[in-house]
Image: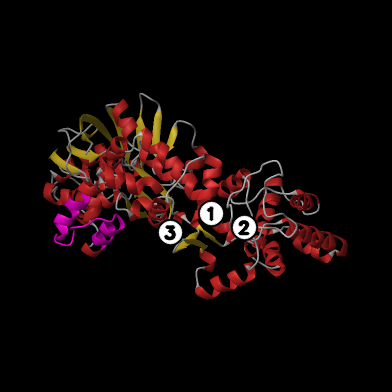
Amino acid sequence: MKAYQLKVQIKNSHPPIWRRVIVPSGITFQYLSEILNVTMGWIGYHLHSFEFFHSGISVEMKSDELNFFDAMDNKSLDEQETVIDTFLEKENTFTYIYDFGDFWEHKVTVEKVLYDYEYSYAQVLKYKGETPYEDCGGIYGYYEMQDILSNPKHPQYKQTKEWVEEQIIQKYDLESINEVLSELKGMNFDATLKEILTEYSKPELVEIAKIHHLSGYSKYKKSDLVEFLIKELLSKEVMCRYFRFLNEDEIQFLEGDERTRKVFLQDTRYVYLLEGGYAGVYADWEDSVFCLPEEVKAAYRENCTEEWKKELREEERFLMYFNVAAELYGNCPVENVVELYKRDTGIEKDEFSVLAFLKDVPKNKKCFVLQGNQIVLSLYKEKNEYNRLLREQQGEDFYIPSQEEIECLGKKGYLPFGKNMEQLKAFFIKEGKEEKEDAELLCRTIQFIIRIGGTMEEILDMLENAFLEYDKVMEDNRLRGKLFFKIENVWKETNTVVMRGNAEKSETSAQTANDKIILFPGKKY
């Protein structure tokens, strides 16, 4: 993996006190400070900063003492969010300042850029000089103490000796320092695929193999299973099959330069990469840091061609049709969805390949389950709920959505607003003092509740929590009456699951009389 060889020397030290250390690429300055403190032998409890004098940029730590965000301008960066690579490749020297009281200045020289470093953590190669005492007054205070300690007759000898003996001082031990640095690898977040997979237990590795429908893995010990998975995960066949269901954020992560992304703990945007064994994740206080190894990025660039990306977009659209059908109908034969897709794209699909495709779709990418040749909205997958839905739908024909309706529900999560919904939105804006975007969100939520068979009580519960002027409207007889009247009108024009996608006043098709399109000839579902 890529790494940087640095020489770190305390300025004005004579003879020089320095360390030669290799640090992995892709880390933040926050973790570089951890590495440098361990490398130099500092305890690490003081404030610090990095100074790049040629570019006029400083990289600083968050601290109330520093009033970081109040003082920050466009030349001062946050060390938690700034990765070292760009800076270390543009400037071959910079300054690391540790302890703003003693003001230990370190000249850091980038001696080499390595492309075949075998570790994901830092290692000290060589050193010279012992670590000075903390809180001794800086380099000149340190030398003054050395002079005093060399002369037992000095009037301050006893006092200085007692102070030094109270300090945490250890002789510099290269082996121990490197052991500590190796334990910081979890803070590096720039691990290789082998290191990520090695963190799993053997049963967890077996689960990853099953996710990818691999065979022949049961004979391997854990170490051999790791090597087997590395080869398979990076292969074109396995990667291209699994990556069909990546989301947009995961694709951007793969195609971008960064190898780590920090998100809130609850953020699940990169979980699919994690579940497939392609990424690692580490806790960092209240955040999660996802790590994407360089070999995964390289394999993606080689395997996932422009032709593959075109097929990926087509499959995303195909899957969208099934999610829309499940939301509209609650349950629906697979062939009906295939016919809708053919109507809008001209592309024919055979039943076997469609069923195989649907079985491969991860649970978090679809709102339905597959039952034989039927898709069933997950809300109704339990037998009792499913049978109740069938009874309610009895005698209803399938509504035939327009391409515009499919695109709107599939991409935006709601059906296009009709006249009555627009009037309800205007009510929220005028009487409820809602912003346009907030009023639209209220309307979308009401539409969703009605679509899936919800009740007026559920709508009112939602409004009580989300509508700012709810109490005012409900206490005013005129406004309350207007709200109920408008919701009732919306109800009549909303396509519902229990009516197989029809609205109370709608025809069974959104097509005009001139369209002459018959989707399911000879069949009434």
Residue at left offset 29%, top offset 31%: 88
Residue that numbered label 1 is attached to = 336
Give the residue at the far bottom of this rendering: 384
| Residue 133 shows in the view | no
Magenta residues? 204-230
Residue drawn at (22%, 53%) of the image: 183
Residue 8 sits inside the magenta stretch = no
> Answer yes or no: do the residues labelled 1 and 3 have beta carbons within 8 Å?
no
Q: Residue 398 carries which label?
A: 2
- Is 216 magenta? The answer is yes
Q: Is residue 332 left or right of residue 441?
A: left
**Image quadrant where residue 141 sits:** top left
Alpha carbon distance from label 2 to label 1 = 9 Å
448 lies above or below 65: below
Q: For numbered disc 3, what is the local secondary structure?
A: helix
SS at badge 2: loop
Measuring from the top left, give residue 400's x and y in whole percent. 63, 51
Closest to the camera, between mark 3 and mark 2, is 2
Spot the residue most to the right: 478
Q: Is residue 8 or residue 391 the one in the foreground?
A: 391
Q: Name the residue under label 3.
A: 363
Q: Quadrant of residue 25?
A: top left
Q: What residue type is labelled 3?
A: Lys
Quarter of the image where the C terminus is located: bottom right
Counting from the top left corner in percent of width and height, residue 281 is at 33, 53
Q: What residue type is labelled 1?
A: Asn
Q: Badges 2 and 1: C-beta atoms under 8 Å apart?
A: yes
- Name the quadrant of the N terminus: top left
Tell which of 141 and 422 is nearer to you. 422
Which mark sits nearer the N-terminus, 2 or 1?
Answer: 1
